[in-house]
Image (cartoon, helix red, strand yellow):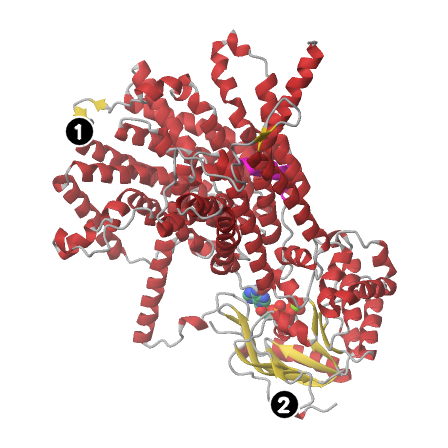
Amino acid sequence: MTELLRFANVSAGYGPFRALFDVSFDIQPGEAVALLGANGVGKTTIARVATGLLAPSSGTVTFGGTDLTGAAAHRFARAGVAHAPEGRSVFATLSVEENLRLSFRRSKGRAGVDAAVGQAFELFPALGQRHRQIAGTLSGGQQRMLAMARVIVEEPRLLVADELSLGLAPIIVDEVYRNLDRLRQHGCALLIVEQHVGHAVALCDRAVVLDRGRTTWIGPADQASERLVRNLFQTESPMENSPTE
Amino acid sequence: MTLAATLGSDLLRALLQGTPPGTVYALIALGFVLTYKTSGVFNLAFGAQASISAAMYYKAHTDWRWPILPALIVSVFVLAPGVGLLLERLVFRHLRTASSVAKIVVTLGLSIAVPSIFELVFQFQGVAGRTPEGIVPNGAGVYYDPFGVYPFSRNELMTMAVAVTAMLGLAALFKFSALGLQMRAVVESPRMTELNGIRADRVSALSWALSSSFAGMAGVLIAPRFNTLAAPDFFNLVVVAIAAAVLGKLVSLPRALVGGFCLGWIIALLGTFLPRWSRTQTWLRPFQENLTPSVPFLVLFGVLVFWPAIRRAREASDPLSGVDPPPSSVGSGARGASRPRFSRVIGLALLVGIGVIVFIRADTSWIFLVTQAVVMSTIYLSVTVITGLAGQISLCQGTFAAIGGFTVFQLADRHGVSVLLAAVIGAVIAAAVGAVLSLPVLRLGGVWTAVATLAFAYLFDSVLVKISWICGGGTSLLQGTRVPRPVVGPWDFADDRSFLVLTVIVFIVVAFAVTQIRSGTVGRTLSAISGSEVAAESIGISPARARVTAFAVSAFIAGLGGALLSIHQRNVNYGSNFSPFAALFWLVLVVSLGARTVQGAAQAGAAFSLFDTLILRGTFMGWILRSSKRIPEIFPINPKWRFVFFGLGTIQFARHPEGLVEHGKRQMRRRVDALRKRRTGSGGSIDDASPVSTPQPSSEPSNETDTAVVPVGETTR
Ligand SMILES: Nc1ncnc2c1ncn2[C@@H]1O[C@H](COP(=O)(O)OP(=O)(O)OP(=O)(O)O)[C@@H](O)[C@H]1O
Ligand SMILES: [Mg+2]
């Protein structure tokens, strides 16, 4: 088997509430996959399962050939999965530099930390100027940049990015996507959750369309928007889909 | 000698004299900040952790005659980190996402349980009279006098050296080491730390081991200053140290150190330079005499109330807390009317039956215990109001109760006012104090409310209790604080049975009032606030009024109960009934058993006075076996077990705020419901029921016919 990440019949939920039902898909090494769907269909939940934040209630998750079902998040991270979670994804109480050091210390070892921090500041000079600022006081865009800087320098095998462009100015969004593209050039696979279908489709090879916790379509990214629209019309009309209880 | 020279040497002496106690405060403040920084827990059990290491050192070095080094290693580097690891693994790991109020309640429970466990395991008794030895040979006997004005003992110098070294070491840990960085990261968000490939569990276990060792070190170093090794002394000391720690906003180690020294110096300076007005104004004397011990509590209270920045220093929230399922909502706390009426009637009948049996058959000692249970239940209803309804932790309920008791003593014993009238007046005074106190205190919210009320309780304890026209003062030591029993018309309540009837009536009236408040406007407002204060405010609910009312009502009930308790015991007995540490156990009991219902308060009252006699001594077992001779060997169980039992009972508060009893009942009811459902064949097991009203996918996707779901294996690029 060659795929990097594989979901096989994964179900997951929060307490008694089930959010995912038998989701199966896979990501090849270096491939970019977009997760599309309306609000609340379970995109973030898939991202959480793919990074070990949430253990699936059934089904298996394999990464790079090893079964990581139910493993703690640090094992996913060590295997090469990076995650930019929805919302704030930096430590608000640590400084910019400490945020970077925290993660480089493990990934690059004691000797590599300084070089890695230098590299990050080279890529994002704006961060370098603020290296002692507490990350919680950075603007939303700068925080996103900090998260990107970390990921780009670490060169993970898979980046799971959840709504990276949310609330960012269009110029910054372009910048974010340029960086994602750069990651791809380095052979990093991407799993991208995005509301801006246009951006995602342009970047990705394939798309997974979700509806209410299930995959309804998997196929080439450029056909995704059409499917998405059709999907919308289908689920609006018939009432059999809505819960009876 | 010139005036300036005397002043100078006085000043120097005061500063030097204040340094050793200042070091003690600094050391504990450092430890407290360390725990807070590395675990995010406002750890009031720090004193308990310190005390068991001190006790272990005493046991090993003094009782078993071990040399200093092995005794030190066992108590500080084996026992202390072990306790820290256990606490992390068994308690705090599961409370990571709990609210800070829930965590502080757990630490209170641990403050009571941990020393008791140690004493039970090692058969240790808080020693009095023999001073524990320090960690340097002959530490209390050798003095050095560097400036020729004040001699330091070896122990004191050692403590200072350790405090400064520890501060430098810890600062270096946080500033320069990878581990320190990881510890800080884990406090903010364990999950995000995991995403960085770091094992959050292991880091937080290490944090606990470290801070617990620090507590142990502090305990061993400080012990020689006391002549007891009792847990309440250490608890008191932690409250003092919090005053130093808040000066550093709870996160700055150097500021905590400086804060500790400053406290020591301020106290010494006040002692040296305060003008002696009391020579001419005798009424001032008690204030002046008790000013110094109360300084830390004044500082703590003042800082919390007048320094708004500290309130805003809230912990950064975990951005990944959205991964957790929603906590059991407040709405489910209000019980549905599902409880069948007949079970209620049976319960009531049972209670009345027991009451009648007690009333007719019981001997004096049983009547005494049952009356005490009823009175304590009344007091506990005050906790039901403030904690159960308003969701605030008040640690000065003992003070309110004491106000009730002392008022009866003053008015009835000294001024001949009718006892019952005096009790009501006492309750009103308590309510007034509560209302005034609530204005600055309740605005703080959460942990800070708890700490401010604790500071107030200690303030009362260290100053007001000693003043003769308030609480009895010096004369009461000789004569006691006598409280007579009331006589109303033909009824003389000096008779224990009639007094029992009186207390039951009071309890019923108060309980009824509490249920009325709960279902009335105030109760609804309070439950809206505890859901989300901001949201409640935005729809026009004013939290302030409801809170002040709740606090005043709670203080009134506590005052009334305290008055009754004093009347019952015919003495105020402040130390054993109402002192701040004694009153901690109240909160612990009520919270363990159920802070939301009248029933919970009643059970807590029963547990307080009957648990020991009935359960631990095996009496109940004897009744079941119908012979006191057949009671199994393990009885009587050491009464300390109740501290362990109920202290640890607070741990479940974080997950099931409704309390042990209510939680048990709900489990039961759910099971019964499930059984019934299965009988009637309506299928659906309870696990499928979704409490979230989001539309759920139906079990069969209806659109599979025209949407191609490409099987994973077959996708091609
Ligand atoms: N912590 C939680 N507890 C309970 N239910 C949750 C929790 N987090 C998410 N859910 C529910 O799970 C479902 C899927 O949520 P998810 O966050 O995965 O959606 P999403 O596709 O990311 O939506 P959006 O586009 O709005 O971010 C939703 O119905 C949501 O209400
Ligand atoms: Mg989402």
Question: Which image quarter is the N terminus of chain B in?
Answer: top right
Q: Which mark is residue B711?
A: 2
Q: Quadrant of residue B205?
A: bottom right
Name the residue type under label 2.
Pro
- Give the residue type at disc 1: Asp
**Can you give x and y, in whole percent of width and height, for residue B22 in the image?**
59, 33
10 Å crowding of disc 2: few (<14), some (14-19), many (20+): few
Crowding around mark 1 (Cα neighbors within 10 Å: few <14, some 14 to 19, many 20+) is few
Query: Residue A159 at what x, y percent from top left?
Result: 73, 74
- Residue wearing tag 1: B495
- The span shown in magenta is B240-251
Q: Is mark 1 within 8 Å of ligand 1?
A: no
Res. A154 image quadrant: bottom right
Which numbered dot is residue B712?
Answer: none
Asked if disc 2 and disc 1 are in contact, CB closer than 8 Å, the reply is no
Q: Is residue B404 left or right of residue A104?
A: left
Q: Of residues A188 and B664, which is closer to you in this image?
A: A188
In this view of the protein, can residue B353 be seen by the observer?
yes
Share a chain, discs 2 and 1? yes
Residue at 27%, 55% (x, y): give it. B341
Q: Main secondary structure of the magenta part?
A: helix
